[in-house]
Amino acid sequence: MNPRMPDLLFSDLAERAVQYNARASVPDFDACVREYAELAAVARSRCAAVLDLYYGMGAAERLDIFLPRADCRPAPVFVFIHGGYWRSQTKEDAPIMAPVFNAAGVAVVPVEYTLLPEGTLGETVREVRSAIAWIYHHAEQYGLDRNRIYVGGSSAGGHLAGMLAAAGWQDRYRVPDDVIKGVVALSGLYDIRPLCDINVNEWLRLYPDQAERLSPLFHLPRPGLPMIVSVGGLETQGFKNQTAAYEAACREAGLDVRRVDAPHCNHFNLLCELAKADSPLTQATLKMIGVSR
């Protein structure tokens, strides 16, 4: 292993399993899920939205569009991909940032995808890329600016956001190379090879060479792409090291990376910072998009 690379493997498989067990790292996981649901309910009650638009033929290939007021349209777009280790959670609990972002003139688009193990991770990556293509080709119809699409995600969603930011897939989906204008990656998994030897592979079902092909660390974005990375100070070292490794690789590749520290956050409530208008994470994201609240 490169001595400069953060440790993603740890001392043995038992320790590795602990380091990548996000749920066990918080004292009350159910409380975190309730907070998502409550904030999402506020978003649905306050924001104008078009729900359950199909971007593909699968039952799970759906997205919602939370729109700012009419005088802000066509609006820049913040596409958000939920976490849940690729096997749980839904877009319905994801639009927690919509009230704040809509107030700043930004549309919020939570994306659903087929959960594992019903689908494969390769299929999930294809689905979220199809969602971006759908948004790009249907933007005008929904008051969106196709030339200002930004993506974000948390945990497994951070991994998928990284795969959206990657170079080389865009031609196959009939979108420009720079269709993604910026990325917000929260507590993501960027090298998923270490997961192939622990319980996560019960639903990933990948060999290491397959995992490498699906890891953002080995498929970096184009140079110069604005990127925000963050990981909670209360998270395990495994998730901290994943973010550190991806951040270092992106900087070395010439990306414009900003790290937003969140020492008070755990793996789950870090996302809730985007629901706060005055949080450093929200302010950095809106600045990247080019708006202010």
Image (cartoon, grey):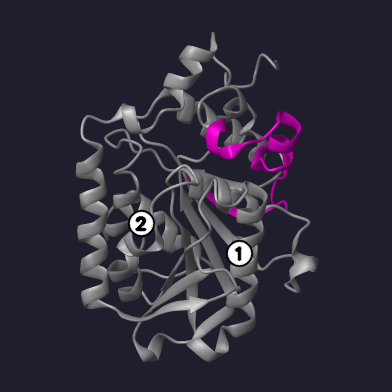
Residue designated by label 2: 282
Q: Position of residue 167 (x, y in %)?
A: 74, 54
Q: Residue furthest front?
A: 118
Element at label 2: helix
Residue at horizontal 55 percent and vertical 81 percent from the top: 145
- Which residue is found at the position 30% from the left and 61% from the top? 96
Q: Secondary structure at mark 1?
A: strand
Q: Which residue is mark 1?
A: 181
x, y percent for residue 67: 38, 80
56 lies above or below 3: below
**The N terminus is located in which quarter?**
top right
Neighbours of disc 2 within 10 Å: few (<14), some (14-19), many (20+):
many
Q: Is residue 225 visible?
A: no
For the residues marked 2 and 1, what is the alpha-carbon distance in whole angstroms? 17 Å
Q: Which residues are magenta?
A: 201-229
The amino acid at mark 1 is: Lys
